[in-house]
Amino acid sequence: LRPQPAGKCACGGFLIGWGWGIVAWLNDRNPPMPQTDATPKDIAAGQEALKRADWASAAAAFERALAAADTPEAHGLAEAHGLAEALSLAEAHDGLGIALWWLNQIDSAHRHRAQAFMAFKEQNETGRAALIACWLAREQLFLDANVPAMQGWFARAEQLIRTLDPGLDST
């Protein structure tokens, strides 16, 4: 099963429209995270491959970034400077999750995006974490028809969104 366009789902597109509205709002409020020194080339290569819809190259680049981050040297750097400054694991997990989803490796995609959610949340990248939570919520509904899991992910997203400063949409 794949997510359906708004006009073709059983819910009449309400959840899709609502979810993508939040996605657009969060994207406007949260610019991309700055790169760190551990794996910037691979992360940049992965992001460029995603833009070209070259899913296999993107996955390979993000996997290289994650492998480079999982070395004794990288862990030492993380301990010396803090995870947020030393590694961009969240960015790599997020990109890998997106690439794997397009390669139809759904379980792995969900696992990496959930790891990205946790890492962004730990790095106080609240908007990015909320965006991923919305994506995971939609996936729970359309792929597994798991309404409680969908509600849980949307609740996580809502909790994070409430901590953000009000924007133009809150007037």
Image (cartoon, grey):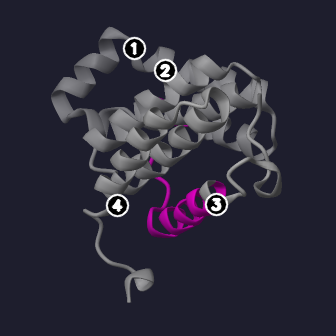
Label for residue 123?
A: none
Q: CA distance from mark 1 to mark 4?
A: 31 Å
Q: Is residue 23 left or right of residue 124?
A: right
Q: CA distance from mark 1 to mark 2?
A: 6 Å
Residue 69 sits inside the magenta stretch: no
The type of residue carrying mark 2 is: Leu
Which numbered disc, 3 or 4, marks the residue closer to the eye?
Answer: 3
Mark 3 touches mark 4? (CB < 8 Å): no
The type of residue carrying mark 4 is: Ile
Magenta span covers which residues?
A: 16-41
Mark 1 touches mark 2? (CB < 8 Å): yes
In front here: 47 or 25?
25
Residue position marked by numbered label 1 in the rendering: 70
Which numbered disc, 2 or 4, marks the residue closer to the eye?
Answer: 4
Provide the secondary structure element on which disc 3 rests. Answer: helix
Residue position marked by numbered label 4 in the rendering: 161
Chain-order first, disc 1 or disc 3: 3
